[in-house]
Image (spheres, rainbow, N blue to C red):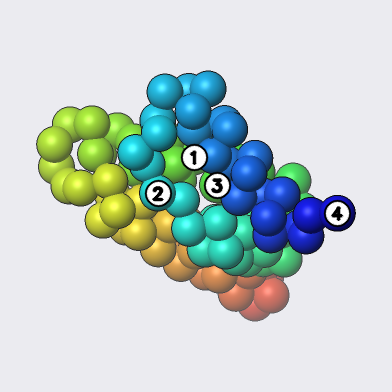
Amino acid sequence: MKSQDETLEDWCRALLQALELEGVEIDVNEVLALAGVAAHSVVRPAAPLTTFIAGFAAGLASGSGKASDASSMQAAMAVARRLATDYAAAEASGA
């Protein structure tokens, strides 16, 4: 039986292949960490929305030639992570 990590790696590889993105590297742990921040800082359903929107933004930046795939993804995920933690802080302070 495969571990969860092996299953996720296999799934990502299959999905990337199906979407004709074989050369794209995905840091599964980083994406899951961002999802965790969003889920715990905003609400649970924010996790898939946050990762989708960050990925979409990274794809637009990368596709426009503004930055490499890796730096586009890192930048988008950093913005999303910062916004989620700021959101939680603002909610806690009643703002």
Badge 1 vs badge 3, beta-carbon distance below 8 Å: yes
Q: Can you see residue 28?
A: yes
**In 3D space, how far apart are the residues under numbered discs 4 and 1 (Cα atoms)?**
33 Å
**How far apart are the alpha carbons under marks 2 and 3?**
15 Å
- Rendered location of residue 24, percent (x, y): 37, 41
- Horizontally, residue 66 falls left or right of residue 6, namely left
In primary-sequence order, the first of circles 4 and 1 is 4
| Label 4 to label 3: alpha-carbon separation | 28 Å
Q: Earlier in the sequence, mark 2 or mark 3?
A: 2
Element type where label 2 sits in the image: loop
Q: Secondary structure at mark 3?
A: helix
Residue under circle 1?
Answer: 53
Q: Secondary structure at mark 1?
A: helix
Between circles 4 and 3, the one closer to the viewer is 4
| First in sequence: mark 4 vs mark 3 | 4
Q: Which residue is mark 2?
A: 25
Label 4 SS: loop
Q: CA distance from mark 1 to mark 3?
A: 6 Å
Residue, x 49% and y 40% (percent of image)? 53
Spatial CA distance of label 2 from label 1 is 18 Å
Residue in view at x 72 percent, y 66 percent: 40
Task: State the image coordinates of residue 79 (x, y, percent, origin top left).
Answer: 39, 59
Q: Quadrant of the N terminus?
A: bottom right
* Residue with the mark numbered 4: 1
Tell me the amino acid under the disc marked 2. Glu
